[in-house]
Image (tube, grey):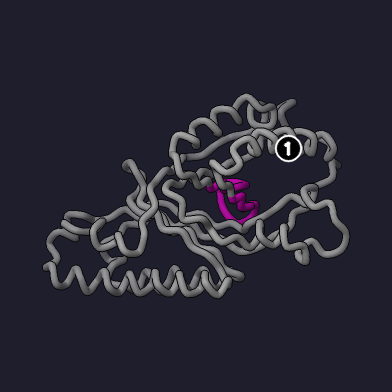
C-alpha cells in the first residue's frame, strides 16, 4: 500500500455562506434594522478581539453572483468553538434574514514534506504562522473545494509517496510565482466534509485568481489529478462598511 501523506494540522475552519432575504429585510423599519445590524456588528467585534488575542482569526466578505451574498471564514482551536459561534450567529435577529447557502468544515493543514527541520514542527515559528494564520483582509477572496482523482491510471492514492511529493513540489513552485499577489490557505477536510480540501485565496487584484488557477491547470498535479467544486469570489466587507452594505 502506498504510504499516506502526513500533515501538520492547526486551527479548525468554518466557511459559512449566507444569502440575504432582501425582500423581508426591506420590510423591516429603519430603526429596527439599525438595532439588528448593531447586534451583528457586535459579534464581528468579538471576532476582531479574538483575532487580536491570537486565539483564532476571521474573514468577512460579500460574495459576487447568485450563489451567496456573504461569507464568514472562521478559525478556532476546537470544533466546539466553531459550533458555538455558528449557534450564536443563528440566534441573532440578523440571522432571521439570512438563508444558509453553503458551508464547509475543515482544518488548516500543511504537508509534513514542507517541514525540513527536526523535532516538533509546531515549535517552528514559520510552521505556526502557516497552520495558525491570521487571515489577511485583502480586497478579494476566492474559495473552492477540491479532490484528487481516483480513476484508472490517474489514481492519486495509488501513487508512491515519492512521486506524489515530486508532483506537489512542482505544483508549489507555480504558486510561489504569485507570492505577494495571492495569499493561500489550504484546509484539509477528509472525514469532515464532502470534498478533500478547501482552498482559500486572497488577493488585492481579483484578476490574479484567474491567472493563478489557469496556470495551475497546466501543472501535472492539477491537469491529471485535480477535481474542483464550485468557486465563490467576493469583496472584503470591513466592519465599518456593514451598515452601508445593508442599506435599502
- Which stretch appears magenta? 185-200
In the visual, does 87 lie left or right of 183? left
Instruction: Locate residue 96, reporting x and y percent.
Output: 27, 66
Instruction: Locate residue 144, reporting x and y percent.
Output: 51, 43
Whether residue 190 is in magenta: the answer is: yes
Q: Residues within 10 Å of mark 1 (few under 14, many from 20)?
A: some
Where is 215 relative to 29, above or below? Answer: above
Quadrant of the rendered structure where residue 38 is? bottom left
Where is 71 relative to 173, above or below? Answer: below
Q: Residue at x 19, y 58 (%)?
A: 247
Instruction: Name the residue tied to disc 1.
Output: 168
Q: Residue at x 32, y 70 (%)?
A: 40
Quadrant of the rendered structure where residue 157 is? top right
In the visual, does 149 lie left or right of 22? right
Q: Residue at x 35, y 48 (%)?
A: 68
In the visual, does 220 lie left or right of 21? right
Q: Residue at x 45, y 34 (%)?
A: 207
Amino acid at each position: 500500500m502506498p504510504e499516506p501523506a502526513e500533515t501538520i494540522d492547526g486551527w479548525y475552519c468554518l466557511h459559512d455562506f449566507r444569502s440575504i432575504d432582501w425582500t423581508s429585510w426591506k420590510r423591516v423599519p429603519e430603526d429596527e434594522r439599525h438595532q439588528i445590524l448593531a447586534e451583528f456588528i457586535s459579534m464581528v467585534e468579538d471576532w476582531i478581539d479574538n483575532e487580536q488575542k491570537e486565539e483564532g482569526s476571521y474573514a468577512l466578505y460579500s460574495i459576487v453572483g447568485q450563489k451567496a451574498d456573504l461569507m464568514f471564514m472562521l478559525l478556532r482551536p476546537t470544533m466546539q468553538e466553531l459550533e458555538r459561534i455558528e449557534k450564536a450567529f443563528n440566534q441573532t435577529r440578523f440571522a432571521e434574514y439570512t438563508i444558509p447557502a453553503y458551508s464547509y468544515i475543515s482544518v488548516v493543514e500543511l504537508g509534513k514534506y514542507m517541514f525540513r527541520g527536526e523535532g516538533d514542527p509546531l515549535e517552528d515559528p514559520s510552521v505556526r504562522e502557516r497552520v495558525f494564520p491570521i487571515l489577511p483582509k485583502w480586497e478579494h477572496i476566492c474559495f473552492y473545494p477540491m479532490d484528487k482523482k481516483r480513476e484508472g491510471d490517474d489514481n492519486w492514492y495509488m501513487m508512491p509517496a515519492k512521486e506524489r511529493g515530486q508532483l506537489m513540489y512542482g505544483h508549489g513552485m507555480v504558486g510561489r510565482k504569485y507570492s505577494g499577489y495571492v495569499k493561500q490557505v489550504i484546509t484539509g477536510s477528509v472525514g469532515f466534509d464532502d470534498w478533500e480540501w478547501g482552498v482559500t485565496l486572497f488577493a488585492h487584484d481579483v484578476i490574479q485568481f484567474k491567472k493563478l488557477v489557469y496556470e495551475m491547470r497546466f501543472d501535472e498535479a492539477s491537469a491529471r489529478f485535480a477535481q474542483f467544486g464550485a468557486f465563490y469570489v467576493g469583496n472584503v466587507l470591513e466592519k465599518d462598511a456593514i451598515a452601508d452594505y445593508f442599506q435599502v
